[in-house]
Image (spheres, grey):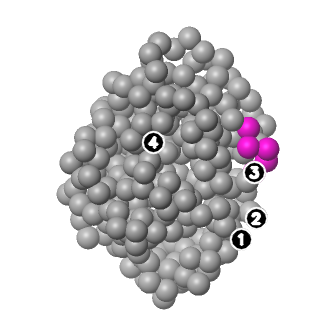
Amino acid sequence: MSTPKLAIVTVTYSPGQFLQQFLESIARGTGLPTHVIMADNGSIDGAPEAAVEMFADHPTMQVELLRTGGNIGYGSAINMAISKLREERGLLSDFILISNPDVVFKDCAIDELLAAGERWPKAGSLGPLIREPDGGIYPSARNIPQIKNGIAHAVLAPVWKNNPWTKSYLDNEDMSSERPAGWLSGACLLVRRDAFEEIGGFDEGYFMYMEDVDLGDRLGTAGWKNIFVPTAEIGHAQGHSTESHPEITLVAHHESAYKFQA
């Protein structure tokens, strides 16, 4: 196998069957050879280990398991994996794909993101259209939240899904056109390596939630753009790992929202 041209980073935390589906879909998303690093935050289901074995002889994809040493959070795990990429000669290209392991890439989705990256030389991040399990479109390209809507959404959304502040917070200008946005969902992001490293990657002060909002905000402040690319489409089984740990995620949600608004 020749040196991979695209690095893909994902964070695993007992991902179950979603991980295999994610890995199998990569070949549909791009024709490029790939190197996948799974930054594992303490899985106990054996799925990451099984994935390494299952894809050991794959002709166009290498799968590597990186143990983070515990549940260090999403952004910290991504940063650790990208640091590992720097140590492995030939694995860093102009772009790095960051994705949740419960994503499924539709036909040419990754190639569409890469093509958009060439069209937008100041794009620091690019994100696809995200299709929810019921077929709806997830509002993944948004404005930077204001303090009123951001705090109200963080506090009320877990207990009052359709409250007016959450509706305003999730409101989108356009989900059909390729365009700049304030921030893009961290479920799947193609980041330009130079831009990501210029701002220091993810802020590791966020354990989970809001790290993507913060990333988009800091990229914009640094002069980069966050580009929504609706011709690139993924499916996303949202919350597969977070829903089973509400005692952790609810607190993390509130803390992250407060940190960002502060």
Which region shows up in magenta? 67-71
> Marks 4 and 1: CB-CB under 8 Å?
no
Real-space CA distance between mark 1 and mark 3, rounded to the nearest whole angstrom: 15 Å
Q: Amino acid at mark 2?
A: Glu
Give the residue number, with chain letter if any, for mark 1.
251
The reply, left or right, for residue 39 in relation to residue 105 is right
> Tag 3, which secondary structure?
loop
Instruction: Using the rendered view, name the quadrant where residue 2 is placed.
Output: top left
Percent position (x, y) of residue 153? 52, 78
Residue under the point 65% across and 54% down = 76
Question: Which of these two is toward me, 149 or 192?
Answer: 192
Question: Which of these two is toward me, 60 or 152?
Answer: 60
Select label 1 or label 2 by which is in front.
Answer: 1
Give the residue number, with chain letter if any, for mark 2.
247
Q: Amino acid at mark 1?
A: Val
Q: Is residue 69 magenta?
A: yes
> Tag 1, which secondary structure?
helix
